[in-house]
Image (tube, rainbow, N blue to C red):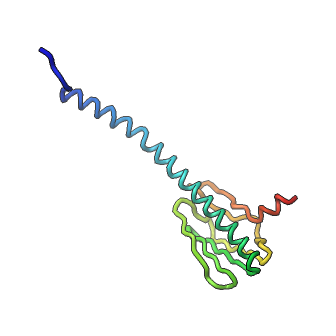
Amino acid sequence: MNQRGMTLVELLIVFTIIGLLVSVVAPSSTKLMDKARAQEEWLVLDRTVDSLAFKAYAEAQYVELTAKERTLQWTVGGKPQGVLSLDYLRFDKPQQVLINPNGLADVAEMSVLQADRKRALRLNRWLEARR
């Protein structure tokens, strides 16, 4: 007799194998996605700080950065201007940075944690390129 299709046991075996593969692959792909999102957030933070240094220079005003937990706030000329909220990065301690009207920060770097790995956001990098 000619049979077509699959039996219920064969289907259960296939679904079990697929389930095992998903349970092995899913955690590692989730970690990779979180790492990629953290790197994207790092780039946004870096660009934001660089653009604020340029803004200080272009407008000849002081820019003050206040970093605390998962938030970076800034003021330009003493007036509150903006907030950057972070999901994958955090500041390990409260930090204050003052960028003068020449676009120079008063500290060399800001300390940031990415999944309990300490990273340094270097400020005034454009000075290093000129040396």
Q: Is residue 70 above or below residue 60?
A: above
Residue sitting nearer the eye, 67 or 104:
104
Q: Residue furthest top?
A: 1
- At a point 38% along the width and 35% down the height, the residue shown is 21
Q: Position of residue 46 (x, y in %)?
A: 66, 62
Image quadrant containing the N terminus: top left
Q: Quadrant of residue 109?
A: bottom right
Q: Position of residue 105 (x, y in %)?
A: 76, 71
Q: Is residue 38 above or below residue 57?
A: above
Q: Is residue 123 above or below residue 16?
A: below
Q: Position of residue 10 (x, y in %)?
A: 23, 27
| Callout count | 0
Q: Is residue 26 left or right of residue 38?
A: left
- At a point 51% along the width and 46% down the height, the residue shown is 32
Q: Quadrant of residue 126?
A: bottom right
Q: Residue furthest front?
A: 58
Q: Residue furthest left?
A: 1
Q: Is residue 23 left or right of residue 122?
A: left
Residue sitting nearer the eye, 126 or 71:
126
Q: Position of residue 73 (x, y in %)?
A: 60, 75
Q: Residue furthest right?
A: 131
Residue sitting nearer the eye, 76 or 32:
76
- At a point 82% along the width and 58% down the height, the residue shown is 129
- At a point 15% along the width and 20% down the height, the residue shown is 3
Q: Is residue 41 left or right of residue 124?
A: left
Image quadrant containing the C terminus: bottom right
Q: Quadrant of residue 85?
A: bottom right
